[in-house]
Image (spheres, rainbow, N blue to C red):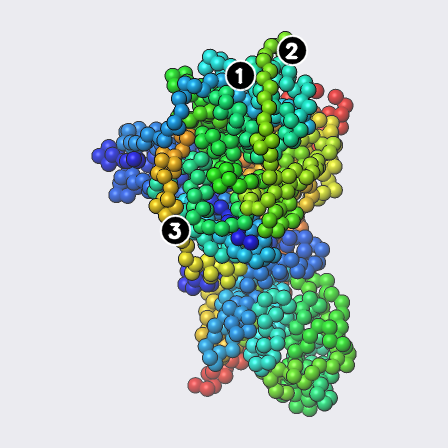
Amino acid sequence: MDYFLNEEQMMIKELCHRIAEEKVRPVTAELDEKDEFSWDVIKAIAQADLFAIFIPQEYGGTLSLAPNQKIGGVLDVCIATEEISRACGGIAVSYAASVLGSFPILIQGTEEQKKKYLPDLASGKKLAAFGLTEPEAGSDVSAIKTSATRDGDYYILNGTKHFITNGGEAEIYTIIAMTDKNKGPRGVSAFIVEKGTPGFAFGKKENKMGIRASATRELIFTDCKIPKENLLGKEGMGFIVTMRTFDMSRPGVAAQALGLAQGALDITLQYAKQRHQFGRSISSFQGIQWMLADMATQIEAARALIYATARMIDSGITNVAKESAMTKLFASDTAMRVTTDCVQIFGGYGYMKDYPAEKYMRDAKITQIYEGTNQIQRNIIALQMIKEMANK
Amino acid sequence: MTIKIITEKCTGCSLCIKTCPFGAISIIDKKAVIDSNNCNLCGACVDACKLKAIILDKPKARTAKINLEDYKGVWVFAEQKKSKVQPVVFELLAKARELAKKLNTEVGAVLLGNDLGDGIQDLISYGADKVYVVQDQKLANFQDQPYTKVLVELVNKYKPQIVLAGATSIGRSLVSRVAVKINTGLTADCTGLDIDEEKKILLQTRPAFGGNIMATIITPNHRPQMATVRHKVFTATPYDKQRKGQIISEKFNDEILSTQVKLLDIVEELESTVNLSEADIIVSGGRGMKGPENFPLLEELAKVLNAAVGASRPAVDANWIPYSHQVGQTGRTVCPKVYIACGISGQIQHLVGMQSSDVIVAINKDPSAPIFKIATYGIVGDLFEIVPALTKKFKNK
Amino acid sequence: MNIIVCIKQVPETTKVKINPETNTLIREGVKSIINPFDMYAIEEAIRLKERFGGKVTVISMGPPQAESALREAISMGADEAVLICDRAFAGSDTWATSFTLASAIKKIGDYNLIICGKQASDGDTAQVGPGISVHLDIPQVTYVKKIEEITDKKARVERMTEEGYEVIEAPLPLLISVVKEINEPRIPSLRGMMKAKKAEIKSLGAKDIAVDSEQVGLKGSPTQVVKIFTPVPRKGGQILQGDTADVVNKLADLLKPEIGA
């Protein structure tokens, strides 16, 4: 389908496809097997300027934004993420998670903060990560316990974040911590914390079912002292920053899921054509054909939804909570369905690690869980619908 | 000057389009139209058109200001390394004899080097009537500049009508310079050489487009007609100790022998394994080898067969084996008697490097691997079982 | 360091297929790419520029569409591109091509180093690089797999041979042809692609490089093509059946005449 991408977006698509085929695909199986993060591949992505496409030109990026707009280039990021994800979901999420970790600075950062942190992120010299989730605070984000206590010119952070993508590899972390327990959700703030700050350590690296090329670690804060200048926005704005960030970044996760689905469909189509049973190609059986048709249709619908939402965000619209949630929900469910069908069509070979099918399915599952489980997405959508109806 | 379609005769049958290697013809309004930007004036369409609706008007090519009749003799450049004449030279001498017979002329060999010893007589025993020898310390090892200057001097002095050389890294570097210097035509990597009986000129046939098409080329108005030929394309005649010939020694001054480029060192990497270009049998490994630690399996089979070890690009890119072993489009082209491809899928980039081998054996666990389409003998199976079993079998023979 | 890189646009020969019925080349849908070996030449030039400063100029002799190859080179980091294009150049063999390129280089100006790819994947002759060095009367080193050291006066390089390699020192200006082992060509950056899109490609015709029409194009080519045909395609043979012992025995028997065992 033609999505009327502009010239630059076509270039990004082409460039990412090349990187996916030449740099990512040759190493994806090995990284998955060895549970390894590859700086080589990240460097290749960075060298192609792909970390610059969502950062404004004045901070070292290639993006031009309208004067009052904070976020842009989301469609470009989605295109890039999708193409990379077709070859490896793990590497794609390492890219997308750095975008996610950068968004709070773009949305809420001061001029000084932007000038200090964004250039290295735009060049890909440093990666970012977003630290929200805690052992006791997954879907229930209000239950976070990590505290940030004001002490003169500093804040002292104490607590643990876990399941943080790019944890340990990233240099720049946007951390959500409680500044005032008594104010409930209004007592939470967002901070920038740099790797290497005394009191900021990393816990174990998680051994995951999928997206194993991405590094997932615990972040441990023990009396970690950060300058007060590292507060993002004002105290109490933490959840607002978080919600806004997720609204903008969910299409990116959706794009990762979409890429997985597309990659799975690509190999399934090839396999179905080659595989002969009962004297003919299995792609000639109606049952298989119907499965392929359903897979392709759902993928296209997910793509259309992602691109439409991304375009809304890029045009400056900020009230996109419902659309963003729909995008993430639909794309991730699609990815799970498509990749499962992919394994099914591959049959016995689909179950074997020698063949690429099973990795897509393992990689897809997480997309239904992180950045807000699909159950939470449904909550968001429904609440938004009811609010809109009530306002009529 | 040019190529024209006689539109009245053209029926738009598209035969010409299919033959054009450069995609320069298309059908517009039911008639063939040639895009002069892409057309290389090769004439393939002229031959293909059954209705003779295409005319190619080749302009009179620039003629060299020479008398073609003055040029006589078929020469072979005798490449030597460490004073040993390379096998390809003997193959070329056999071909040169054939061509010389048709032209009613003699075969000359040109040998540059130092301490050449038996090499000179060997050239005669393999077919040369005359050997032009230039011995000097400065020529001991091949270097572009002195070799070019000496060869140019010899050609200008003795005026051979044909000069052949091996398409080796030395041969190709050297004769391409000589041809330009002498202002004559050179055809590289010929797989066929013959004499046009009528015109008494050399017909040079060679592959292009990675071997997808063949072209026959002539050098009608310039001399000598130069061509390079790959190793193992032609066959040497048996060594004939009784054969007699003339040895002509030439000497050149320091200026001719001088070089701006210094050869500092020669490093050999292949050690005990046989040189890929020389080998009659090659055992080659690809992605299916799974790692560098498995290449010794191939080395063992190679040892038993007295073969060289080759590799496809993925194995080289993964650093499992050095680039000097790479066979394929960006590696070496080989044509051994037997090529045993182990764990190589047979992508076209690899095939262009080995598809002219006499016998191709493919061992691969994937039955749909493209290599089975061109393999003389294919085995669908686990190379880790089959290769050692083959080694054992050949060891026992 | 001023570097000139000579590139050629070629059809993606690995994708060129033969029509099994007519035994002719199928060229539809085969896209044009930069000759694979030239990619290494471009990359090496850019790396040298990154190390020493200077300029990389890419040139190509070809029809107007060869411009896209030049733009791709700019997207990788080349500074300027020149297309040498004229109907008069059509039908050139390697003598005429190297003459034309050398003449264009003389027009373009000063250079320290000229880098060419080892050979073009359509012609496969490897003759143009050496030809250029003769026309320009500068030394050459072919099959360079590594530049060990280089200044604007001289270079020490490794030249690949069948047995290994040679270490060679040559004065600049110099022409080198490079092989795959020398580097890994980069994927262009987005900024590079945008620059390439907007770049102005200079075009030089026969008059601009002041060449004698007798020495270019079909007229200037000592060699002529008299026939083009497709070779009989190699067909597959037989798949040996059986367990390991069976196939090994069968194969050993079949190979007996070749191996002489």
Q: CA distance from mark 3 to mark 1?
A: 47 Å
Q: Return the residue nearer the eye: B343 or C191.
A: C191
Q: Earlier in the sequence, mark 2 or mark 1?
A: 1
Residue A174 visible in this rendered orientation of the protein: yes
Chain holding disc 1: B
| Viewer-side residue, C253 vs B136 | B136
Q: Are marks 3 and 2 on the same chain?
A: no
> Whole-percent x and y of residue A347?
60, 49
Frontmost residue, C189 versus C109: C109
Which quadrant holds residue A373? bottom right
Q: Is residue C241 left or right of residue B24?
A: right
Circle 1 is placed at which residue position?
A: B107
What is the x, y in percent for residue B43?
36, 32
Q: Are marks 2 and 1 in one subunit?
A: yes
Element at label 3: strand
User: Which residue in the structure is indicated by mark 2?
Assistant: B241
SS for callout 1: strand
Q: Farthest bottom residue?
A: A182
